[in-house]
Amino acid sequence: MDTWPASADKASPSAADRLAERTLREGVREELKRLLGEGQLLAPGPEDEARIRVLIGEHVAEYQRRAAVTNGTLLRDPAGLEQRLFDGLLRMGILQPYMDDPQVEELLINAPNRVLCIEDGQKRLLPDVTFEDDEEVRQLVKRLIGPLGRRLDETSPMVDARLADGSRLNAAIPPATTRYCVVAIRKFILLAHSLEQLVALGTLSRPAADFLDAAVQAGVNILVSGPTGSGKTTLLNCLGSSIPASDRTVTIEETAELRLESQLPDCVALQARAGNIEGVGEIRIRDLVRNALRMRPHRIIVGEVRGGEALDMLLALTTGHDGSLGTIHGSSPRDALDRLATLALMAEERLSKEAAIEMVARTMDLVVQVRFSPRSGRRQVVSIFEVAGLEGDVLTGHEIWGWDPQAEQLTWKGIAPRCLDKMAERSIPYAPPSPTLLETAR
């Protein structure tokens, strides 16, 4: 059975404070409903938040006065209790300290008394973070998704939503789960905004970063592949920062995570949207890719390819949008290419397998493979694979940069890539690394 180390205690409240918190929470909530109404409590403005803080302070002070008069137990941490009440009403309750912690990447609720976090790439059990019961977990989720027009009930037992801070929330309840409300909250964290910063973090070697920078400038089509949590979006954002300022770029995402609008002068960001409670108003990735073609883009960036939009992206690449980028789930470059072709087959147009594979071979130039290394605690680029074409009905290619386990870094394989021609056409100053330069880089 898997076990995880317990996380450090984040000022766990005393039993007396916990009891007082339950009592005060209900009193404050009822008064707020009378003052603000249920709808305003779901989405309060700055003035409302200030009033709520004052009200909470008054209730806590009154509790302390009453305890002193009756010789009861005084609160050990009244300021901490006030903050927990505020977080419980408007934020994420007992999860808020971990949402505020920059080292925490993800929070997982498997049961009311089994909450885990992923911190610096390591999974940890939080023994002091417990909900009173499953209903409290459900109410937390419903409060978070309510302003987004989403719901979680027996008729809609699964929900996937983007919170106001950019975090992704996924929740499921019975009958989709066997017993409890299960929640996963993945925080929005971009640790780097350029290839230069990836080099500083140890994600990428300097020579490989120089190559990718030149490839992006030259208009090479690049697919970033890797498992969940491997840093695909961060790498995609860093690659996008190398796009020339003169190129018009359209980014397309299901959940807005890229920050290229602030880096590129001519960048437009499009975002998908799920349907509302009535099932209307949905905006699909496919719709956005098609619309992007009418926006005169030089390049199209698809945050994550996971469905029939693969076909639309491949079609866009055949119509002169060189230098486009995207990410996909894959355990290796070849798996990523196979998955891209398979996803294209999922489109309503019912493309043949042979045609899908041929389109992938003609449009994709490079696959950059990333992974998370538990040993080093870092996300690393472990392969840069160039697509060579087709041999019969099989995609062919070769690694031009590969992972050296002894040196523990990405190394040049000595094969001159075909994209050097594109670099020369666009007058991008780049030459493959020599052995001497590689030794210096190490």
Image (spheres, helix red, strand yellow):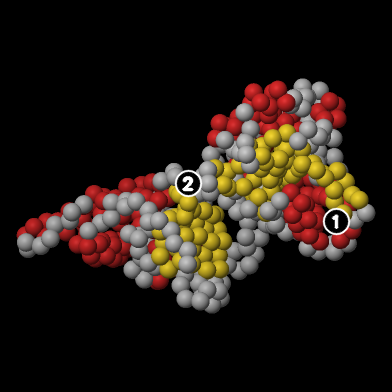
Residue 368, relative to residue 108: is it above or below? above
Residue 349, image x, y percentages: 84, 62
Of discs 2 and 1, which sits in the foreground?
Answer: 2
> Is 400 drawn above or below residue 332 in the view shown?
above
Q: Nearer the viewer, residue 393 or 102?
A: 393
Q: Position of residue 210 (x, y in %)?
A: 69, 28
Q: Is residue 31 left or right of residue 346?
A: left
Q: Is residue 256 visible?
A: no
User: Image point 62% across, 39% down: which residue?
Assistant: 406
Q: Vertically, is 74 above or below 1?
A: above
Mark 1 highlights which residue?
Answer: 356
SS state under label 1: helix
Disc 2 to disc 1: CB gap under 8 Å? no
In the picture, residue 112 is in which quadrant? bottom left
Percent coordinates x, y for residue 334 in the rendering: 77, 51
Secondary structure beneath dot 2 equals: loop
Residue 179 in view here: yes
Residue at figure coordinates x 74%, y 49% from the top left: 333
Packing grade of label 1 (10 A; few <14, some 14-19, many >=20) is many
* Residue that mark 2 sits on: 120
Question: Image quadrant of residue 214?
Answer: top right
Q: Amino acid at mark 2?
A: Asp
Image quarter of residue 392: bottom right
Report the quarter where the C terminus lies.
top right
